[in-house]
Image (cartoon, helix red, strand yellow):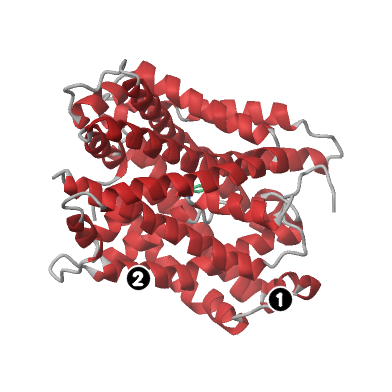
Amino acid sequence: MENNRGQWGSNLGFLLAAIGSAVGLGNLWGFPYKMGMNGGFAFLIIYLLLVVFCGIIVVSIEMVIGRKTGKSPVLAFGELGKRYKFIGWMGVASSFIILGFYSTIGGYVIKYMVDFALNIFGSGSFKGVGGAEYFASVFQNPGISVAFHVLFMALTIGIVMGGVNKGIEKFSLFAMPALLVLLLIVMIRSVTLPGAGEGIKFMFSFSSDKFNFFQAVRAAGGQMLFSLSLGMGALITYGSYLSPKENVIKNSFIIPLADTVFALLAGFAILPAVFATGLDPKSGPSLLFETLHEVFNGMGTVGLFLGFAFYLLALFAALTSSVSLLEVACSHFIDSRLIKGKSPNRGVITIVVGAVITLFGLPVAFDALGSSGMFQPLGLIWLDFYDLLAEGIMMPSAALIMSILVGWVFKDKFMDDEIEKEGNKFIWRGFFKFCTRYVTPVLMTFVLISLVMSFFGK
Ligand code: PHE
């Protein structure tokens, strides 16, 4: 099925690209900390249950929608019924919004990677500067924030311009194994530091006075949606380039499994080192840039190399995610031209869409994580505002609507026909049906309501 939209060269290429989309900054700065703060092992169980009852379900729904229609989200939903097009539009909007804040953080990752390299060669400026102080000098400098945000977008654009097979797939085939190797190196050093055990204890131990069941479900639910890149059409888009030969159900088990394994490995790489250095764990940008900078910088020359390795792996993780975000938006414009009988120019479309998203991300880059004194929408810093729109509202809404549509409107044949194509078996069929109808919609409704409340401190 050669066509001029593009197609994955192999199922492995598709899998690594999809796992690459899933494994990103969310795994590094979100999962380990949330696990430690929300009941440790109990959180892990709740997270895994959510992955099984919602994650795998929505992953498979998205892949089926993509492959069945062979189109990007807006046109894909349009094919299922004109009135469903808005779900695809929410996906395109989410891709702008998420990439709008993701790239500022991705930019800081590049800045730190470069800085660690400079310090290895003795020309850096780390000496005697604490993690918080150093980070402030980076993010409160609008010139640096904007320049590295633009650089990160340029790298993302460069990969997506190469196309599905020669850009995204080729990059993922290289970056994902490299990411795993680097993560293992950092992890081995981290868990063998004296005092590392405290970090593992923080991650896994359960203390009943800290544990709030609903709080844990909401943290796990938001984390799962964001981490699996769900509800915004990334897997619809990637699925639309998948050959009908490939087994959707098998893939929908592998992607969440690999994402969870990466999240746990990230925890082993990060938390033991934080505790061994005597620091307190945090989440978000402060973990990634203040705490970890202090950790690596305190380890002497080895630390500089480890720091470089860590930010390089974070860059690979961020780029394989950002390309999927940009691809959702670009594929929409590519398909829209194809449907009009025109031949799309992927290069031009990618540059234009990428440039618009770069502009869209500027408020986050200028906001300096809220310290700029800029106008704050809804009283939130710009990063959180964008995050609320996408992760808080649109992703859970879309996941909820998709499971209701498949469970109650399109019914069984919709999934069956696509999954059982070319003799593949729909394993766990009864379970899928039961989830799309009852379990997934109920859980997603809860996650949606509680996530929105969490942004306002409720
Ligand atoms: N899953 C990515 C992460 O964990 C973020 C992402 C969300 C990427 C949505 C693509 C789509 O960092």
Q: In this view, does 337 lie to the left or right of 398?
A: right
- Secondary structure category for the residue under label 1: helix
The amino acid on which the numbered mark 2 sits, given as a three-letter code, is: Ile
The residue lying toward the viewer, choosing from 450 and 68, is: 68
Cα separation, mark 2 vs mark 1, equals 29 Å
Q: Where is residue 102 in the image (x, y as percent from the top left)?
A: 44, 38
Say which residue label 2 marks. Answer: 46
Question: Is residue 105 visible from the viewing direction of this image?
Answer: yes
Q: Where is residue 57 in the image (x, y as percent from the top left)?
A: 55, 69
Q: Where is residue 196 in the image (x, y as percent from the top left)?
A: 20, 53
Say which residue label 1 marks. Answer: 416
Q: Which residue is drawn at 28% across and 71% down?
A: 42
Q: How many marks?
A: 2
In which quadrant is the C terminus drawn? bottom left
Q: Is residue 156 above or below residue 24?
A: above
Q: How crowded is mark 2: few (under 14 residues within 10 Å), some or many (20 or more)?
A: some
Q: Residue at x 64, y 61 (%)?
A: 63
Sequence-wise, which precedes: disc 2 or disc 1?
A: 2
